[in-house]
Image: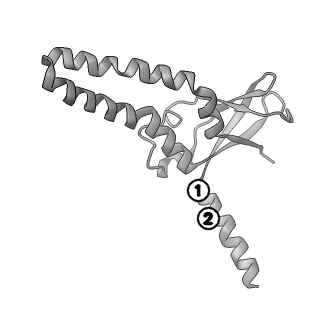
Amino acid sequence: MIMEKLEVDNVENSEQNLVKHGGVVSKISKNVITVSLKGNINCEGCKAKAACGATESDGTEIEVFDDKQSFSLYENVDVILEKKLGLKAVFWAYVFPFILMIVVLVISANFLKEWLAGLISLFVLIPYYLMLYLLQDSFQKAFKVSIFKIN
């Protein structure tokens, strides 16, 4: 009986650490399944919903890498992501670039004119986002999104 309670608690804790979003398979290619997300009531309680674009738009699409290809077109699915990965994505997309821009602005303002320091702090984002683009394969492996069929 104690073992059953521990298993139930572990399942409940794991579900609390996941973000589940309903969607429809809109495109299937070689190893990529594109899922169009539907509106989700679970987003209301999320702390990162202000920075997440998935809550505002029903036209949001997510690409999921799947070798099994067990899904069919226009099939209803659930897209699942760990909450900590969602917060990590918000950090790399919004928080870190903001911190980088402010640090460059403060440092360059000590040595250059204000307008030039402002331009440099904006232009520092170009190599940053270029780096993110070049490392997108690494980020896709780190931010693993899973999809499951809805019964």
Q: Which of 147 and 103 is in front in this view?
A: 103
Q: Give the quadrant of residue 116.
A: top left
Residue 5 in the image: above or below residue 35: below
Instruction: Judge left or right: residue 56 versus residue 147.
Output: left
- Identify residue type, mark 1: Asn
Q: Residue at coordinates 72% horizontally, 84% vertically from top-left?
A: 2
Inter-mark Cα distance, 1 to 2: 7 Å
Q: Residue at coordinates 66% horizontally, 72% vertically from top-left?
A: 9
Residue at label 2? 13
- Secondary element at tag 1: loop
Quadrant where the image shows the N terminus: bottom right
- Secondary element at tag 2: helix
Q: Give the quadrant of residue 25.
A: top right
Pointer 1 local density, CA inside 10 Å: few below 14, some 14–19, many at least 20: few
Pointer 2 local density, CA inside 10 Å: few below 14, some 14–19, many at least 20: few
Residue 141 in the image: above or below residue 3: above
Query: Could you say which disc has been placed on residue 17 in the image?
Result: 1
- Identify residue type, mark 2: Asn
Residue 6 in the image: above or below residue 71: below
